[in-house]
Image (tube, rainbow, N blue to C red):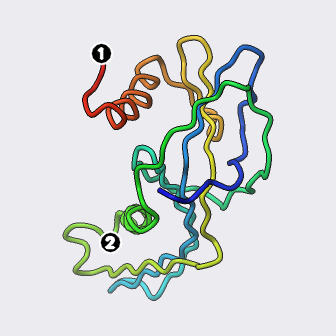
Amino acid sequence: MGDRPEGFLPMKTALNCGDKAILSPVYLFGANVMLRGIFFGLKLTPVTVAVDAASGRASLLEKAPEILPLLELPPECRRLEAKLSRAVAEALAEEAAVPDNARGWRRGITSAKILFRPGDCGFVWRVYILRGNSLIDGFSGEAADASGVVDLLLGQRQNEAGTAEF
């Protein structure tokens, strides 16, 4: 999409010899969630939202991660393409940052406003580790079986070829 990711998310799981790496671009947005309701006053909560630019998945992070400028990677690592623009990623981040108590019918008694912090935005790489038949998220340390690999790569291959390859 024009932007190049600068830096890497920190890794909880290290790369071993023989592992393959898949790099996925991620937008990070720092925001303040302002809640106001009938039963409570004004609450301001800082959050960081990570939006995967390849798949469109958004997740809330407990705190802003420290971005690593360089990381030792195997020579043959696959880089996924960013499918989302920064504006679309920001809209997904805003949707993800709204708390559950301000959704649905509760919107009538609770108001939520998302205020992005301009200096706390970034575009970085998230490292996925392909180890045997499992896909490990290097940032969170969570592992998935081979279906996670297929989901990650099939969405990318479908974008490149126009149809999915089985």
Q: Quadrant of residue 20?
A: top right
Q: Residue at x 75, y 31 (%)?
A: 73
Query: Please, is residue 118 above or below residue 61 in the view?
Result: below
Q: Residue at x 30, y 20 (%)?
A: 165
Quick one: SS at disc 2? helix
Expressed as whole percent of the image width and height from the top left, the position of residue 114 reads 44, 77
Q: As rendered, which of 117 and 106 lies closer to the eye?
A: 117
Expressed as whole percent of the image width and height from the top left, the position of residue 37 reads 35, 84
Do the CB atoms of the residues marked 1 and 2 lie less than 8 Å apart?
no
Query: Please, is residue 40 above or below residue 131 in the view?
Result: below
What kind of residue is marked 1? Phe
Q: Residue at x 37, y 27 (%)?
A: 154
Q: Which quarter of the rendering shows the C terminus? A: top left
Tally of numbered tags: 2
Q: As rendered, which of 116 and 156 lies closer to the eye?
A: 156
Q: Nearer the viewer, mark 1 or mark 2?
A: 1
What kind of residue is marked 2? Ala
Crowding at dot 1, Cα within 10 Å, few <14 / some 14-19 / many 20+, comes out as few
Query: Please, is residue 144 above or below residue 94 in the view?
Result: above
Expressed as whole percent of the image width and height from the top left, the position of residue 11 reads 72, 39
Q: Which residue is mark 2?
A: 102
Crowding at dot 2, Cα within 10 Å, few <14 / some 14-19 / many 20+, comes out as some
User: Gap between marks 1 and 2, in whole Å?
Assistant: 42 Å
Left or right of 40? Residue 69 is right
Q: Which mark is residue 91?
A: none
Q: Quadrant of residue 41?
A: bottom left
- Which residue is the extreme one toward the left? 105
Left or right of 85? Residue 78 is right
Expressed as whole percent of the image width and height from the top left, the position of residue 86 reads 46, 65
Q: Which residue is mark 1?
A: 166
